[in-house]
Image (cartoon, rainbow, N blue to C red):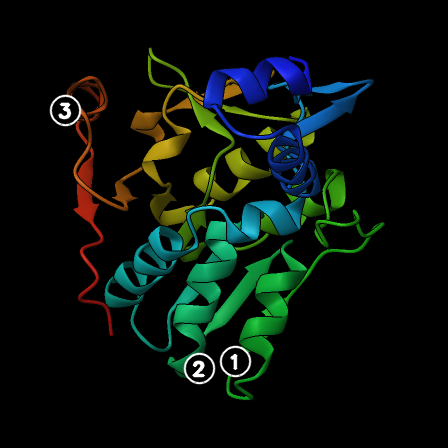
Amino acid sequence: MSVEALAEQFTVTPQTIRRDVNALCDANLLRRRHGGAAKVDPTVNVSYDARRVAYAEAKRRIGDEVALIVPSRASVALGIGTTPEMVAQALAHHEDLTIVTNNMNAAMQLAANRSNRIFVPGGMLRLPDRDLLGPETEALFRAYRTDFGIFGVGGIEPDGSLVDFERAEVLARQAICQSCRQSILVVDRSKFGRPAPAQGGTLGDADIVVLDGAPEPALAALLEAADVEVRIADGGGR
């Protein structure tokens, strides 16, 4: 849309629209076009830093809820993304954790506690996300039988399929899910209906789904059909 059309629609000045467009472009939610702006391609993920601040409070509550499930001295496989990073932050006060992760943001959160053992794969660090993907990552997850496997997802399709933005993300997530005793999907409700191109797995792959609030009827029906335990992060936390 053009700046002029947006200004007319919202009854504000073009200068106000330009400031708002700049802020949304900085958050990687819009792309600048000559004289206006367009939506970001939904098949391309937004930047890690933008995702970090989006729904931050919801993700914090999810992390605190997971910290109530995972005890000290447990072994945990932890996947990529901003919500697993928030889980790592919530687990920072647990003792003697064995962590297997390809999420360097999460690894650094947990490295502050010297009682933890942290295993990370080799390979090239993906920037700016600061994570690792590929065969070495999948092999590392499959080399351990962890008590808990904790993973996020790019989106949840209306039929309950799980989707991510790259095939390598799907393969790493599936390696976590298949190599743990109890799998935990951590996801805020904005992910329901969010499109992404790489498909793999369903809601039923998780033993526990931790949400930031009560699901809408369509998502609730999918969760019931998948026969998974649902935990609602209500902010009680630690």
Is residue 119 shown above or below 238? above
Q: Nearer the viewer, residue 39 or 81?
A: 39
Q: Label 1 neighbourhood size at 10 Å, few (<14), some (14-19), many (20+)?
A: some
Residue at 39%, 53% (x, y): give it: 59
Residue at 37%, 77% (x, y): give it: 73
The Cα atoms of the two marked residues, 3 and 1, are separated by 36 Å
Task: Please tell me which of labels 2 and 1 falls first in the chain.
Answer: 2
Task: Please tell me which of labels 3 and 1 falls first in the chain.
Answer: 1
Residue underneath mark 3: 224
Is 40 positioned to the left or the right of 191 in the image?
right
Q: Secondary structure at mark 2?
A: loop
Q: Which numbered mark, 3 or 2, is in the foreground of this view?
A: 3
Residue 41 x/y as whole percent: 66, 18
Type of amino acid under label 3? Glu
Question: Marks 3 and 1: CB-CB under 8 Å?
Answer: no
Question: Marks 2 and 1: CB-CB under 8 Å?
Answer: yes
Is residue 78 shown above or below 94? above
Residue at 64%, 66% (x, y): give it: 119
Is 219 positioned to the left or the right of 141 in the image?
left
Q: Secondary structure at mark 1?
A: loop
Type of amino acid under label 1? Asn
The Cα atoms of the two marked residues, 2 and 1, are separated by 5 Å
Q: Which mark is residue 116?
A: 1
For the C terminus, the image quarter is bottom left
The Cα atoms of the two marked residues, 3 and 2, are separated by 35 Å
Q: Is residue 196 visible?
A: no
Residue underneath mark 2: 96
Residue 107 x/y as whole percent: 61, 67
Type of amino acid under label 2? Asp
Q: Which numbered mark, 3 or 1, is in the foreground of this view?
A: 3
